Amino acid sequence: KLLVNKTGLEPEEQRLFFRGIEKGDNQHLHREGVKDKSKILLLEGNASKEKKLEETRKQNEMSKAFEAIAGVRAEVDKLSNKVTAIEVAINGGNKAAEKEFLVLTELLMSQLLKLDGIDAEGEAKLQRKAEVRRVQTIVDKLDSLKARNSNPFINNSNAVKVTTQWETFDSGMESSGTRSDNSPSTEISQDWERFE
């Protein structure tokens, strides 16, 4: 325990040797013949080394995953800007070439494949999942734009809404075209006009 601050190794990570023999946790050094000026060898335990190597490996993998996700994110940003440019053009009444939609969709799908190939854990896995959702949203938007491009009347935001309102014509006896529920829609009278 006294050596933890100097070495950075916890007691369970330490291996103490005196005269070439490893001393166990239950042994007392003064009973084993350790005196002032005696040389004691302290080594890091194998389990500790393996644990640190595993932690380092995981950190490296996570770092690679973050890097790969950042690379995909940068590429998706560029593709998203192109989709936005197409949207602006279509909203302005212009048409885009069908090939643009196909190329952008394929490029976005290839980014999805790249994301699928990234082995990620923890925070990196959450970032990868968020990026997958983002790409899928952009692909959906692109599909919507493609439909609007081929048929401009599909545009939901600027569409002309046609509704049919039927007007009923009564006998003209009521005011402003509204009738009360208890009055008949047609009044029959006995006043006949004769033509001779």
Image: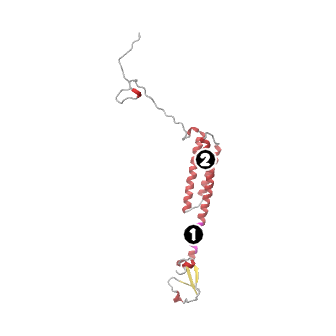
| Quadrant (top left, top right, bottom left, bottom right) of the C terminus | top left
Secondary structure beneath dot 2 equals: helix
Residue 42 in percent (x, y) is at 58, 81
Using the numbered discs, state the Cα–Cα distance from disc 1 to disc 2 in whole angstroms: 42 Å
Q: Which amino acid is tagged 1?
A: Glu
Residue 56 lies in the magenta stretch: yes
Q: Judge from the rendering whether residue 138 lies leftward or rightward of residue 189; answer left or right.
A: right
Question: Disc 1 or 2, which lies upstream in sequence?
Answer: 1
User: Which segment is the magenta one?
Assistant: 49-59
**Residue 84, horizontal then vertical, whole percent:** 60, 47
Q: Nearer the viewer, residue 32 or 171?
A: 171
**Residue that numbered label 1 is attached to:** 55
Name the spot of residue 27 as percent of width and height, x first.
51, 85
Whether residue 13 appears in magenta in the rendering, the answer is: no
In the image, is residue 165 above or below residue 69? above
Residue 37 spot, x, y in % from top left: 58, 89
Secondary structure that dominates the magenta span: helix
Q: Identify the residue at horizontal 54%, vertical 59% (top origin).
A: 126
